[in-house]
Image: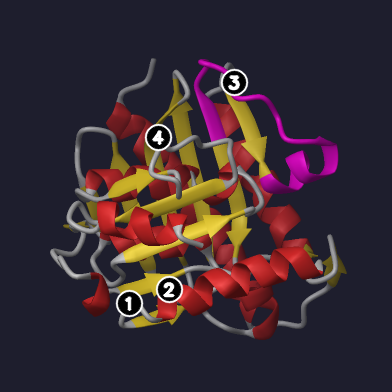
Amino acid sequence: MASPSELLAVAVEAAKSAGDIIRKGFYQTKHVEHKGQVDLVTETDKTCEDLIFHFLRKHYPDHKFIGEETSAAHGTSELTDHPTWIVDPLDGTTNFVHGFPFVCVSIGLTIGKVPTIGVVYNPIMNELFTGVRGQGAFLNGSPIKASSQTELVKSLLVTEAGTNRDVSTVDATTNRINNLLFKVRSIRMCGSLALNLCGIACGRLDLCYEIGFGGPWDVAGGAVIVQEAGGLVFDPDGGEFDIMSRRVAASNIHLKDAFVKELKRN
């Protein structure tokens, strides 16, 4: 098995190569397809995923792979104990299409189903978040840590409305947001769960949750980075985080209990 530092270096190189494609495409006319009513995919998503998987397979031919575009087409792959690269080649596709610079490449590696390596790279803002289990989290090479905020009412919360537009889902989502607005300082919707998690890791954001997101590729990289920055990743009900569950919450160490209490009320 390769060393953690080698695995990270390969993941960073893959993310930066894909980032070059995203940066170039960001300023060009996009060719957009719909995966759902509001969920989008572009040629850039597909090109980046092909590039990343080809690069990683060249280095680690025995590893397994789960990617957003391939799994969306063929059903989500099962996660095993085998080293598995979980990739979102372009998280924030809607932002990308609209020219809103909150987009990233997200690469995570699980070993024994445990998130172990995380790389999240925003090529438009030139921010590279990295984390290795047991070795800390970094932004552009400098150590980062989760916030020290202890009060919900002074906290900045990030969530997403998701892509499902049936009435019951939208009502549940907006009712939860309405209730939480009375408990926190403000709420943001930035359009990339991977970058939302990195916001928790570097202390820009204090609270994050999302239910019903696309799949493990949205959280595989960010989860490692949050945990290595001293933050917590957990189920919105307060239980253990399950990378395959399409449910996630994150906070600093001080706010989890109060945050979960409010999430359970909704």
* Residue placed under numbered mark 3 in the picture: 61
Between disc 3 and disc 2, whose residue precedes?
Answer: 3
* Residue placed under numbered mark 2 in the picture: 180
- Secondary element at tag 4: loop
In the visual, does 177 lie left or right of 165? left
* Residue placed under numbered mark 4 in the picture: 240
Asked if disc 3 and disc 1 are in contact, CB closer than 8 Å, the reply is no
Q: Is residue 71 above or below residue 29?
A: above
Residue 15 in view (yes/no): yes
The CA span between labels 3 and 2 is: 46 Å
Point out the stretch of residues depicted in magenta. Answer: 68-85
Q: Position of residue 209 (x, y in %)?
A: 46, 59
Indicate the amino acid at tag 3.
Answer: Pro
Residue depicted at 57% across the width and 18% down the height: 80
The CA span between labels 4 and 3 is: 31 Å
Indicate the amino acid at tag 1.
Answer: Val
- Secondary element at tag 2: helix
Q: Is residue 180 above or below residue 41?
A: below
Camera-side residue of 218 and 56:
218
Q: Position of residue 125 (x, y in %)?
A: 42, 76
Camera-side residue of 66 and 18:
66
Q: Position of residue 122 (x, y in %)?
A: 46, 66
